[in-house]
Amino acid sequence: MKTRLFTAPLLGLLLLGLGWSQPSFAQTEPAGLSNLENRVVKLEHKARAHANEGAALFLFGAFCALRAQNTGRNPWLWFFLGLLFSVITVLVLLSKNSEDRKEKARGIAK
């Protein structure tokens, strides 16, 4: 009986001491949580920016492939060149097509 009377208050003090020694969740988490929210927002903005860039590059590749296919060139090669080098590839492909048209016009005129 004596041990129960002695251990119950001791156990209560021990549990109370454990509660005081640890910082509460409300004190530590908001700063970490707001930091995490800021990082997620920044990541979302970066993803949107890269998605727009990716869509533009895909359109350059698709234009090059379509133009190459219409002029008898390899569309897959020109798609990937357009995807990688975008504006430069479009300009090269357009100049090649203009040269082809000039040669075709010379052939018809002869």
Image (cartoon, rainbow, N blue to C red):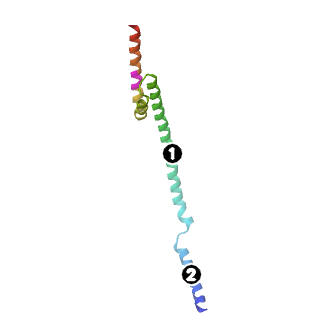
Helix, strand or loop for disc 2:
helix
Q: Residues within 10 Å of mark 2 (few under 14, many from 20)?
A: few
- Camera-side residue: 15 or 31? 15
The secondary element bearing badge 1 is classed as helix
Q: Quadrant of residue 71?
A: top left
Q: Nearer the viewer, residue 2 or 23?
A: 2
Position of 42 relative to 55 (above/below): below
Amino acid carrying mark 2 in the image: Leu
Residue at x 40%, y 29% (from the top left corner):
89
> Callout 1, which amino acid?
His
Query: How far from the left and from the top, in percent, is residue 103?
Result: 38, 15
The range drawn in magenta is 92-96
Which residue does the image show at 57% across and 86% down from the upper left?
7
Magenta segment, prevailing SS (helix, strand or loop): helix
Residue toward you, 6 or 21: 6
Q: Check the image and report above or below for 25 versus 92.
A: below
The residue drawn where x is 42% and y is 33% is 80
Query: Residue placed at 47% from the left, 31% from the top?
Result: 62
Q: Is residue 110 above or below residue 2?
A: above
Q: In what quadrant of the picture does the N terminus appear?
A: bottom right
Q: Which mark is residue 13?
A: 2
- Kindly indicate the quadrant of the structure image that contains residue 98: top left
Q: Nearer the viewer, residue 76 or 83?
A: 76
Indicate yes or no whether the magenta region holds residue 95: yes
Determine which quarter of the picture holds residue 78.
top left
Coordinates of residue 35 in the picture (x, y in percent): 51, 56
Tags 1 and 2 touching, CB below 8 Å: no
Q: CA distance from mark 1 to mark 2?
A: 51 Å
Q: Which residue is mark 1?
A: 45
Crowding at label 1, few (<14), some or many (≥20) Cα neighbours within 10 Å? few
**In terms of sequence position, does the residue under pointer 1 or pointer 2 come before the other?**
2
